[in-house]
Image (tube, coloured by chain):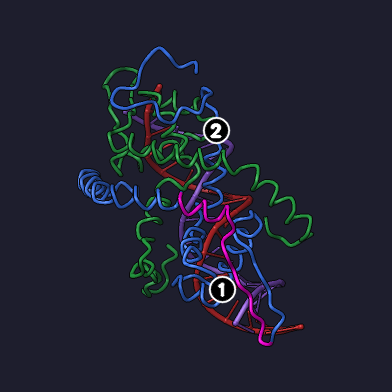
Chain colours: A green, B blue, C purple, D red
Amino acid sequence: MSVGHTEVTTTAPVVSCGEEHEDCGIRDVLDRIGDKWSVLIVVELAQGVRRFRQLQRAVPGISQRMLTLTVRRLERDGLITRTVYPTVPPQVEYELTTMGHALTHLVKALADWSAEHRDAIARAREAWDAEHPGSGIR
Amino acid sequence: MSVGHTEVTTTAPVVSCGEEHEDCGIRDVLDRIGDKWSVLIVVELAQGVRRFRQLQRAVPGISQRMLTLTVRRLERDGLITRTVYPTVPPQVEYELTTMGHALTHLVKALADWSAEHRDAIARAREAWDAEHPGSGIR
DNA sequence: CGGAATCCGAAGCGATACTG
DNA sequence: CAGTATCGCTTCGGATTCCG
């Protein structure tokens, strides 16, 4: 593989949380739901139990590979359950756990914040882009 | 809302976007703060005005390249201001805007959720990993 | 001090093919 | 239906160098 040398490459595991402000754990939750598809899956499952194909159809654009990876990670973190019925053809149901439902509250906060500031951000971007032509930042 | 045939079992609907399977602006805000460093910068700036080097020292592990990119994007989105003093050596100050301060409230919600569920997630992971040896999922 | 420019490995993700 | 395996492109991000 590409592991050429045995040097440790991971540095700075956490930020200094000694101050009065709590920044510990923020990266944890962002590493979990900050990816491209997790929140969309969670939002769909907030509506009720869903099968694999149902999820794929409910989240347009997701590949079955990413759907598999995403639900596996969510299951691993205890946010959803995966129930396999040994039928033919196979049937697998996904459902939010209690903790998964708790996550939907956080997701709602994200949605609310986004809805509240989307316009202002769009305007800020236009102004910045107009003022910084060809800066490479996007 | 058109989803009316089955009610969610344990808790309230919470996250219904109003549409059936519409992408609320959740991805917008996650594309903005879901990256590796943005929230950490915002958290640090929540303490007050900071200079470039101050930020770099306050966020251990960040490269100067990523710090530049991150503050540029935050500035572009109207979340922070960048003030350049034409002194020698140059001095640049970063500060949260009003909208940036509003973002800190959301970040606090993230931190609270993380602190509240970190242990449960860690335990779920241990159980899953023990039950699925060498699955490749991480 | 506060960047910009370049290089390059690592990670994310999509497309496709195959399986039980 | 519900995956798994492989490939390859694209993005992310760290390290380094140079510059006003």
Q: Which residue is mark 1?
A: B64
Q: Residues within 10 Å of mark 2 (few under 14, many from 20)?
A: some
Chain label for disc 1: B
Q: Which numbered circle lies on residue B23?
A: 2
Residue B49 in the image: x percent, y percent? 54, 70
Residue B34 in the image: x percent, y percent? 50, 51
- Count all numbered tags in the image, as a single digit: 2
Query: Does B28 lie within the magenta span?
Result: no
Residue A76 in the image: x percent, y percent? 30, 43
The residue at 59%/64% (across/down) is: B71
Q: Is residue B133 above or below residue B52?
A: above
Circle 1 sits in a helix, a strand or a loop, which is it?
helix
User: Front-most of A15 and A65?
Assistant: A15
Inter-mark Cα distance, 2 to 1 = 34 Å
Placement of the C terminus of chain A among the 4 image quadrants:
bottom right
Q: Which residues are magenta?
A: B88-105
Residue B104 in the image: x percent, y percent? 47, 54
Query: Does B90 lie within the magenta span?
Result: yes
State yes or no: discs 2 and 1 in contact (Cβ < 8 Å): no
- What's the residue type where badge 2 is placed? Asp
